[in-house]
Image (spheres, rainbow, N blue to C red):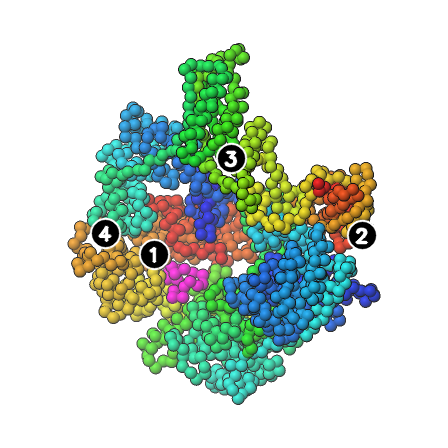
Amino acid sequence: MPMNEFGKLVPHPLRSPREGVAVCAGDGREGSTARRRYAELCVTSNATFLTGASHPEEYVARAVELGYEAVAITDLHTLGGVVRAHVAAKGLGEKCATRFVLGARVRATDLPGVDVCLYPTSMEAYRGLCRLLTVGKRRTTKGQCALTLQDLREHCAGLLSVAICPDDLDADRLTKHLRPLREIYDDDRLSLALCVRYRSDDLDRLDTLAEVAMREGIAIVASNDVHAHAPERRMLQDVLTCIRLRCTLTEAGRRLHPNSERQLKHPDEMARLFRDYPRALERSVQIAERTRGFSLDQLRYEYPDEVVPTGRTPMQHLRELSELGARERYPTGIPEKVRAQIEHEMKLIDELDYARYFLTVHDLVRFARSGVEQIGGEPIPGWQGEILCQGRGAAANSAVCYCLGVTAVDPARIDVLFERFISKERNEPPDIDIDFEHERREEVIQYIYRKYGRERAALTAEVITYRPRSAVRDVGKALGLSLDLVDRLAKDIEWWDEGGVNGVKLKALGLNPDDPALQWLARLTKEILGFPRHRSQHVGGFVITRTPLCELVPIENAAMPDRTVVEWDKDDIDAMGMLKVDVLGLGMLTCIRKALVLVNQKRAGESPAQPALALATIPPEDPATYAMIQKADTLGVFQIESRAQMSMLPRLKPREFYDLVIEVAIVRPGPIQGDMVHPYLRRRNGEEPVEYAHPAIEQVLKKTLGVPLFQEQCMALAVKAAGFTPGQADELRRSMAAWKRKGHLIHRFGMQLIDGMMNNGIPRQFAERCFEQIKGFSEYGFPESHAASFALLVYASCWLKKHHPAQFAAALLNSQPMGFYAPAQIVRDVKAHGVRVLPIDVNRSAWDCTIEGCALRLGMRLVNGLGKPDADLIRGAVVQRGAMKDMTTLWRVSGAGAKALRRLASADAFESMGLKRREAIWQARLLRDEPMPLFEGLSEPAPSDEERAAIPVISSRSAIVQDYQTVGLSLKGHPMQARRDEVRAAGAVPCAWLGDAMKTPDGQAVRVAGIVLMRQRPGTAGGVTFMTLEDESGIANLIIWQRVYQRYRKHARTATVLAIGRVQRQGEVVHVIVTKLRSLDGVATGYAVGAKVNAALVRSRDFR
Amino acid sequence: MLLTTRAGGAERVAHACALARREGIVGGMTLAQARTLLPARGEVLIRPHGAYDDARALRRLALWAQRVCPTVGLDTPDGLLMDITGTHLLYPSERVLLRSVARGINRLGFACRLATAPSFACARAAARFGTEALTVVDAGHELGVTGAYPVAALGVDDRTAQGLKELGVVRVEQVVKMPRSALAARFGAEVVLRVDRLLGRLDERIEAVRGREPTQSEVRFEGPSDRWEALEAAGRRALELLLSRLASSQRGVRTLDVLLHRPEGERERVNITLSRASANVKHLWSLLRARLARVDLGGGHRPESTAATGIEGLTLTALRTAVLRTRQIGDARLGAGDDRHGSDALQDEVIDVLVERLGAERVRRIARVSSHIPENARVTVSVMQGGALAGSSPMGWDEDRLPPRPARMFDPAQRAGVMALTPDGPVTRLRWNAREYAVVACVGPERIEAEWWRWETPTDRDEGRKWRRVRRTPSARPPARDYFSVQIEGGRWLWVYRATSERKGEDSCKSAEGWFVHGEWC
C-alpha cells in the first residue's frame, strides 16, 4: 500500500495538493484490457461525524488506485467532505480517469429507514441540493436535519437519486417505500442500490430487490454502501461507532458491523459479487456519467455589490477612496515611495479583481468608525461613538489598506511586500483580519447581518478534529479502559508519539508497555488524529456573497441563537475562492478607546482648543515612553506585559518602533525553539559580530541582524537560500500552520530546506535551527505584518500609560477581564506611579472607574456580584439629588435592590455617610425588597430606635481580607502586611529587597513570602513552573524546577507561600531559584480557616 | 480513597479518607483539583459516592441504636439524635453511657463523636464541634460549652453564617449576645429559634425512626420433642400462620428463615430462598418440609454431641418479602381460557424445587448477549439472577434482525472436509463424522469477523473451539469465519463455516484454514 505510509494523518489537500500524483501514475491500468467498469456511488466519509472511517481524500486516492470510473462522496445531510475530495481529485490532474462525483445522503422523516443519495447534474441542481439541506438544517437544532418527502419533492430538479433500503424489508413494504420516491425522481432518475452485505440472506435479498425494482420500473445499481476506504479501517470504524453511541466495544455488541466488507473493493471483485446483475454495474457508471454536467469548479463566487455606488466600477471607487485617504494620511503630500507602492498594489488588485474585497473590508471599518449604515446617512440609533478597530494579517499591511484606514501601520515605516500575500499563482483571496473592541464586536456582526441579510452572510465553520489528547480520551473510553486510567494517559500525553508507544514514558506512569490494550490505544489514536469530531463556529470568519449563500453551501444553525454557520471550514472556503473577513475581538482596543475618552475629557477641561487625541494622532517615537519600556515598567500594556516579555525588555532595550515589532515577535515559540533569541540579543548588544553566511541571507535578514525572527523571513530564506519556488514557499507556510495537527508534510519540506541551504554553502547548524524555528511557528505563526499591527497598539498603550497613568489604569480596570493582571495589581501599579486611588463610595463612584481631579476613583463594577442596572440607578439618583445622607434614603430614592446595597455595604462603600463597613452591613441587612404591607406607612425603623447591637470591631487584617473578598483589592493595605511579623520570624525578607543587588547579591540564599499572583508552566520551558509572589513591598519571581515542584506541590497549590531558595541575577532580571516551599495558609486565626480566606484573596492566574 | 459526586459539569470530592485528607484534600473540591494534590505514583481508589446507600446505612444504624433508647432520630446526612431521657438512669453516669455506645458503634466499624446535653441542639453542636470525641454538657452549662463554637454549630444555613461572619460575628456566644429582635429582623426568625433551642429555652422534637418488624410466627412445644411428626405438624402450622399474617399486605415470601429452638437455649437456623415471591402454602411447605427432614432430631444418633436432643419449638421469619405480582388471567393473543397464571406459577415452583435440591448455581437459564460471534451470543446464568446481563447492550437490540441461528450448537465445532468451487461459493460435498455427504442446498456465506479488541485469533490447535483469548499486538485485519447453511443428503441442515486466519490484503482470504460444522437445525 504505497499510498498509506502516512495515510492516518491526512492533511487537507489544499495543504498538499501534489499528494497522490504518484499514485495516479502507477498501477499500469492501461495494460489490462478487459477492465471492469465500476463507479462507487454511496460513500460515507468522516464528514459524517463519527460514522465514516476514512478521509474524503483517501477515498479518492483509493478509487484511483483501484481504477474506478468514478467515486462519489455522499455524507449524511452534509456537503462537508466534498471540497476536500474535489481538491484531491483535481490535484490528480487531467490524466486521471477517475471522476469525483459530488453527492449527499438524505433521510426523510416520513420514510423511515430509507436513505436517498442525491447527485446534482447541473449548477442549478446543485443550488437545489444546497437549498434542500439548508431547509432541513435551519428547521431544527445544530447538527440535525429534518426533511420530509415534500421537501425532497420541492427540491428535486436536476438531481439523480439512489435509494438504499433497509435490509429486512419484504417485497410489499419495499414497493410501498419506493413508489413515492419514484414519483419524485421521475424520468429514470431513481435507482435502487443493491448491496452485498455478506449476510446469510444476501442472495434472497438481492433477488427481492431486483424483482421489485423491475416490477416498479426502477433501475438497479450496484453499491457497497462504503464506510471505509480499506478493510484496515475496521477497528477504527468500530471505535468511532462506540464513541458515537457512548459505549465500550464490549457493550456495543451487534451495533458494530459484523465484518469489514463495507470498503472500496476492486472492480473485478464487484463484478464477481454482482455476476448475476451485470446491469447494476453498468448503471453505476451511467449515473456517474450523467453527473458530468456539474463540478464544483463551476461554483463561481461573487463578491457583494453593495459596497460599490451605482454608476462606478469597483476599481474606480477604490481608487477614489484611497486617494481621499492618502491625502488625509499625508497632509503634507504623499511621499513618492508610498505613491509608487499604491500604484503597484492597485495594478495587482485590478488584475486579480479584488477591488470589491478591499471595499467590503473598508465598509466594515467605516461603519465601526462612524456608526453610519449608508454613506452620508445618520448613525444608527443608540450609537455609542467610534468602535476602535485595526486590520491585521498579510494583506492588511499594504499601502492601500493604510490609506483606506484599515490599518495604522505607515507603509513608509515598514517594508511591505504585497505580492507575497496576494499571489498571482494561486487564485486565492487576500487575508485580512480586523480586530474590533471586544465589548462591541457584536455591533459589527449585527451590521453585517443587517446589510447583507442572513441569506448572504454567515459564519465560517470550524471543524473540531481529534488532537492527541482528545483522541486518547475517546479511544481509551471506547476500548473500555477505566476512566481514571484514560484521564492519566490523556494528561501525560508524552507516553504517546506518532510512532506509537513510548515504552519508557509509559513505564514511568506505572503501566506495562506491552499491554495490548495500550498498543491498540496507540495505534488507533494515531489513526483517528485529524478526524473531525463535530462542527463549531469560527471565532469571527464571515462569508459574504452576492447571490444567496445557501445556494453555494448548506447553512446550519449554530449553538448560539441567531447565528448561522456554513458547512465549510476556512480551508474549504479558501479552496473555493470565497471571500472571508475575520471579525475578531481584542480587549486592548476597548481599553485604548476608553483611555482616550478619559484623556480627551481631561484635555478638554484644561484647554478646550486642543484637538481630541486619537489612536492615529498619538505622538510617535516618544523617548520618555521608550525609557519606560526599557525599564520593563509595562504592567497592563498590550503584549509586552507577560513575565517573559518583561524580562526581555531590559535586554532588548527598544529604542524605536521597529524594536517593538521585534519585541512582539521574539518571545514566541518559533524563535525560542529555533534558539534565535540569544543570538539576536548578543548581536544587538554588540557582543557578537553581525555576519551573514551567504549574501542571499544578508538581503533577507539585514533588518534583524542576520537572525530570522519572522515567518516571512523564513519563507524568504526558503526562496532565496534554499531554492524553493514562491509556490513551494507558500505551501511551506501553510504546512507550518498545521503540522502539529496533521503534518508529516513539513518534514519533507524540512529535508528540502536543509539540503537546499547547504547546497548554497550555508552551515548545516544554521539550516537546522531555521527549520526548528519554522516548526515552532506552527503554533503561533507570527509574521512581521501581525507584529507591526500589534506593535502599534503596544506603543499606543505604553504612551498612554506613561503620560496618562490614571486614565490608562481606569480604562484597564473598566475593560476587565483582559490581560495578565488582576485589578489588585493594576491598582498597586498605578499607585506606585504616584496616582492617588480613591475607594468605591456610593456617593462618588459610577459603574466604571472615573477620574476625580488627578485621582482615580474606583467604580462599582469592581464590587463582586453587583449588577450594572443597580449601580446605574444609584449613580443616577446621586447625580440628580446630590449626595445622600443615609442608606434608607438612597435605597428609596434610587430604587436599587436591597441585595445590591448589601453588596455595597460589604464592599465598604458607605464611608461618605459615616458608616463603617460593619455598621453599613448591619443596616443594609434590614432592607427588604418585598413590600411589607403590615408596616406600610410606618416610618422605617431608624437604627437609633433599636437596641444598639454590639458589633465586633474589625481588625485591620480582616478588613483587608474582606476588601479582597468583595472588591478583589484593598486600598487599606496588603494582606501580607498584617503577617509581616510572622513572616519575618520565618526568616523571610520583603520582596522589594530582590531589586537591590546590595541586599541580595547573585547566589545568595534567600527566603521570601507572599500571596501567589500566578503560576505558569509554559510548554517551551520543559516542566519548569514560574510563580510570582506579591507582598506589600513588591513582587518576587520564582523559578521552580519540576523535581522541586513535585515534592512541594501541595504547598505550591496554596494561596500564600514561603519560598526558600537562591537569588539568580542576570542583568536586571532577578529570579529566586526555589529549593523549598512552605504553605502559610495553615495558620488560622480564630475559626476563619486560613485556606478558605486566602483562596478568596486573589484570583491567582493558574497555568494559562 | 476518594468518593466523588457529579454536580453540574464537574466531578467533586464528596468524602476523602484520612490519608487523602492529610494530602490536603477536602470535601467539595473538584476531582481535578484533588488529583493535583495526590502523589503521582500512589494507588488511589476513586469511587462514586452513594448518597442513597449512606442514608440507608444511617437508618440501619438508627435501628441498631434503638437498643440504647427507644426514640432515635436522624440528623442527616451523618448523625443520630437519641432521646436518652430515662435511659441514662441505667448507667452510673452519662459518660459511661457514651463510652458504651461508642464501643458498640466502633465495633460495627464506624468512627463516631458523641455528646449528651440537655437539648438536642446543644448535643448536636457539642458532638460536631466539640474538641473531644465524647462530650457531656450538664444542664445550665450550655452556653459555657458551646459559646466558643463557630456560628455553624447553631445549625443555621451557610448564607446566614456567612452574613454573620461579615459582621464579625463568628462564635455562638456573640450571636447569643445580640439583640433578639434586631437579629430576627435581619437574619430571620430561624436564628433566634436556633439559639433558643441550643440553650434549651425551646423544646425540639425529633422524628423517631421506626423499623419494620419482619413478620414472624412461632410454635412452641411444652417440652423437647424428637418426633418428626411433631416437627412436621408444628412447621406446617407455623407456615400457615405466617402466610395468613402476610396475606393482609399482599406480600409473599422470598427468603424464609427458620429458627429451631433446642433445649437449653441452643438454636439452629435454616434459610430458604425462592426465585420469586410466593404465598402458596403447598409450594412453600414442600420446600420447607424437605429442609426440616434433614434436621437432626437427636435421639441417640450423635452420641458425642453434648447438646440435648429434640427441639422445643420453631420460629419462622419472613426475612425478605415482596409484593405478589398480580398476573393477567388469560392471554388475549392466545384466546380465552388459557390460564397462563397456572402454568407460570407451576414453572416457578418447579424451579424453586430444583434450586432447593441442586443449588442455585446449578439451575440455569439461557440469556442472550449482544454479540456477532455465535458462541458468545448466548450464555447460561443462574435462574436466580435477574435483570440485565453484564456485557449485553443496555439499549437492547432489534430482535427481528437477529440472523438465523441453529438450535443446536456444537462446542467445540467439529472439523469437516468440504469441497467448494469458488472462494466463497457454495459447498458441494461435505465430509463429516467419518462420512461423506453430497450437499443438496447451500446458503451463504455470512461473514463474521473476530472481535479484534479481545485479541483473539484462531491457531491450528484450537480452531474449532472458541476464538481463544490470545494476547497479541494489533494486527492488520482480524480473522474471519464464513458461515454456510448446508443441507446434506437426507435432509439435515448443518451450519458449517470456513475459518480464515488473519488477512492482510484483498485476496489472501483464499487461504482457508479449515472447515468446521458448528451446529445443526433440528
Tell whether A689 sits left or right of B95. right
Secondary structure type for disc 1: helix
Q: Residue at x 26, y 58 (%)?
A: A930
Label 2 – label 4 distance at C-alpha: 94 Å
Label 3 – label 2 distance at C-alpha: 55 Å
Of the residues under marks 4 and 3, which one precedes in the sequence? 4
Q: Residue at x 58, y 54 (%)?
A: A244
Where residue B422 is drawn, which disc sits there? Answer: 2
Label 4 – label 3 distance at C-alpha: 60 Å
Front: mark 4 or 3: 3
B445 in relation to B45, above or below: below
Residue numbers of the magenta segment: A812-828
Instruction: Pick whichever, A1001 or A764, lies toward us.
Output: A764
Q: Is residue A357 visible?
A: no
Residue A438 quadrant:
bottom left
Q: Residue at x 62, y 69 (%)?
A: A184
* Contact flag, marks 1 and 2 (Cβ < 8 Å): no
Q: Crowding at label 2, few (<14), some or many (≥20) Cα neighbours within 10 Å?
A: few
Which chain is home to disc 4?
Answer: B
Secondary structure type for disc 4: helix
Q: Crowding at label 1, few (<14), some or many (≥20) Cα neighbours within 10 Å?
A: many
Q: Residue at x 42, y 29 (%)?
A: B244
Secondary structure type for disc 3: strand
Amino acid type of disc 2?
Thr
In the picture of the structure, the residue carrying the numbered disc 1 is A966
In the picture of the structure, the residue carrying the numbered disc 4 is B185
Instruction: Pick whichever, A782 or A112, lies toward us.
Output: A112
Label 1 – label 4 distance at C-alpha: 24 Å
Residue A796: x and y in percent read: 45, 72
Label 3 – label 1 distance at C-alpha: 62 Å
A584 in relation to A348, above or below: above
